Image (cartoon, grey):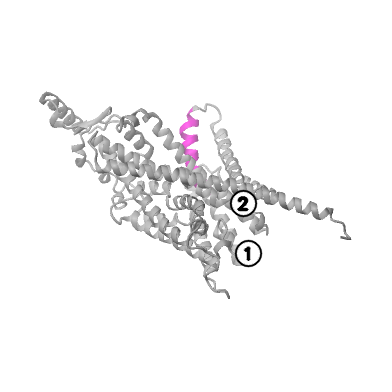
Amino acid sequence: MEQTGSGPIAPESAKPPRVMKKRVKRRNEMEGEGSAPQIGQSRMSVATLDAYDPYEYRVGQGHLTNCQAWVHFIKCSFGTGVLTMPMGFKHAGLIPGFILGIIIGGFCIYCMQLLIKNMVHISARERKPYIPFNDTMKYTFSHGYPMCQKMAGCAKPFTDFILAAYHFGICITYVNYMSQTSLAVVGKQESSEGYNLETIASTACWVIPLCAINSIRNLKYLAPVSLVGNVITAISMAIILYYIFEPSEHGFVSDDWEYVGAISTIPVYIGIILFAVEAFGVIIAVEKDMINPKAFGGFFGVFDQAMFIVLAWYLFLGCAGYLRYGSQVHSSISFTIPFGTWPAVTMYILLCLTLFCSYPLHCFVVIDIIWTSKILPKVTKRPLLWEMVFRWSAVVVSAVGAVIIPELDLLISLIGSICLSVLGIIMPAVMDYNVAWSKYGMEWSFSMVKSMLIVVLGICAFFVGTYGCVYRMVTTSLGNSTAKSSEESFAYQEDEIPEDY
């Protein structure tokens, strides 16, 4: 079968003999010349894909062994996502938290496997060792379902936009967490969540240091900083586990946890688990940089092994933290730990330093997509100056976002529902559907039906999770405003009461 850019692939046996001879001659000329067609212009027969294995041309080109790749996947589980898992269990309840965590986590792992499989397939079709994710999306839209072909020109920009929004959302969560942690260190725990002057001042204090570290233009200078941050994170997690399992007179389990949470708050948990499990940027980057990338996929390959441990770790910490503190758990498990002892203060400071060191790594992706690819080619004078302005502006905007959405769990859930439902579920399924369409055309196949079901589930996760987050944000904001008005009214009434009453 041969693929065309304007419709389904027709069987070669159905073509006239003269046309078949010309196509075979042209294919032999291409293979003899060793040339590869450009993206979006492939006319290669799918029957010849087995003759080209992209993995064979990538062996030894990367820098990560299987063990190092496995460690990178494990390392990405120690972040703000796992810290909000106990709050996620509070939203969903113990039993739904476990069940939904396993289902959504396994579903996300399968979608990532589907994405990598189709990226390799398109690379083989184009006879290239590796094609980036955004170019692969553009290719599948150009050669897929007719409706998708009409949107092929928007596929790559939209993919870049979602990737940039996802990583910029992570930057906002980091600023949010550092601001709240700073307030806890100075004894202002009651002001760490919500709209107040203390939160704004704490966030503003981080702007200048973040602008300084975000001014580092070469990524290799950030590698030692990232390594130190990983060690600090491991120490912080050990302190958190110490407090969760610390013996007390009331025992390990609190009295106010629930088997099933409120239905209205379960969508918030969906966004949290999506954000926690879907380390999209890390997964794509690690697979690209592996010495033996073929070991990445497959049944219980490097990716499956690592993500199994990551998912188990998330569910374990979420369950343990919720059982320990029950309804008293805050948006981050670290904010729930009693303040006043030196291990707790050490943990707060270490976590702040960790996120501070990780901030420029995620912002680098945003800068590369927006500045390097889109803006820089249009700048004619003083490019370095304008790049610094862009970097500092990104820090300021992320700080504003952290102030606008002060609830860390809702912020993380919103990012997971919007960005990761699209990146980690909908896009891999659309890619798989277009690849199946390029093979079978109008003939329905199991892959096409499966892909359509995944797209529907991804859309449901997008709307349900986003609605749940926005609804909780509005109700929380109105609740805080009502409570504040009631306190002011009560204080005014106390002032009016005569002293001899």
Q: What's the amino acid at mark 1?
A: Phe
Q: Residues within 10 Å of mark 2 (few under 14, many from 20)?
A: many
| Image coords of residue 268 (percent x, y) | 50, 51
Q: Is residue 449 visible?
A: yes
Q: What's the amino acid at mark 2?
A: Ser
Q: Which quadrant of the view contains residue 500?
A: bottom right
Q: Residue at x 49, y 35 (%)?
A: 370
Q: Is residue 477 left or right of residue 367?
A: right
Q: Which mark sits nearer the N-terminus, 1 or 2?
A: 2
Q: Label 1 belongs to which residue?
A: 339
SS state under label 2 = helix
Q: Residue furthest bottom?
A: 249
Q: Label 2 belongs to which residue?
A: 179
Q: Is residue 242 left or right of residue 54?
A: right
**Numbered tag placed on residue 164 in the rendering:** none
The span shown in magenta is 359-377
Q: Residue furthest front?
A: 501
| Image coords of residue 375 (percent x, y) | 50, 31
Q: Is residue 218 visible?
A: no
Main SS, magenta residues: helix
Q: Residues within 10 Å of mark 1 (few under 14, many from 20)?
A: some
Q: Is residue 297 left or right of residue 389?
A: left
Relative to the observer, which residue lies in front, 42 or 257? 257
Q: Quadrant of the N terminus?
A: top left
Q: Is residue 113 above or below residue 67?
A: above
SS state under label 1 = loop
Q: Residue furthest right?
A: 500
